Amino acid sequence: RKRIIHRWEYKCAVTNFNKLEILIASHIVPWAEASDTERLDVHNGILLSPTYDALFDKHLLTFDEKGKIVLTDEIEFSAFEKIGITGKEQIKGLNDYNLEYLNRHNKKCLFL
């Protein structure tokens, strides 16, 4: 967790929210699907606000190779708006290692 917090500069990768007691150090490739090395790899982590973390973990939103948010069509856009998601969000600072994990995550997103 500490390494992921430092990697993402102590703020949510999407919103820049910086209350660490609220933020979640999330695996990009889930713990159950990762090797022992991947589980501890800081590049397999992303620091997210709870709303983004929950939807990311359930493959209801993700990010493309440029970090732009991609939303599932299983949820109406108006519902995303109700929880503060605009569809214009973007992660800055993804590196090639993050993208390798993100590509694996995105293969499980049926809306891509």
Image: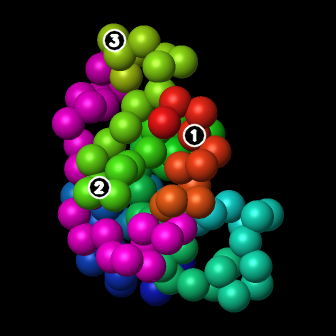
Label 2 amino acid?
Gly
Label 3 residue SS: helix
Region in magenta:
81-101
Residue to which mark 2 is pinned: 67
Q: Determine which of the numbered discs, if any, sits on residue 78 in the image.
A: 3
Label 3 amino acid?
Ser
Name the magenta segment's main secondary structure. Answer: loop
Task: Find residue 17 and report its image quarter.
Answer: bottom left
Q: Is residue 40 magenta?
A: no
Judge whether 32 appears above or below 15 on screen.
below
Label 1 amino acid?
Cys
Q: Residue at x 68, y 61 (%)?
A: 30
Residue to which mark 1 is pinned: 109
The answer to whether mark 3 and mark 2 are in CB contact below 8 A is no
Near-viewer residue (77 or 99): 99
- What is the x, y in percent for residue 27? 58, 65
CA–CA distance in space, label 3 to label 1: 20 Å
In the figure, is residue 88 to the left or right of 95?
Answer: left
Circle nearer the viewer, 3 or 2: 2
Near-viewer residue (90 or 17): 90
Q: Earlier in the sequence, mark 2 or mark 1?
A: 2
Q: Is residue 100 magenta?
A: yes
Q: Earlier in the sequence, mark 3 or mark 1?
A: 3
Q: Local crowd at mark 3 within 10 Å, few (<14), some, or many (≥20)? A: few
- What is the x, y in percent for residue 58? 62, 39
CA–CA distance in space, label 2 to label 1: 15 Å
Label 2 residue SS: loop
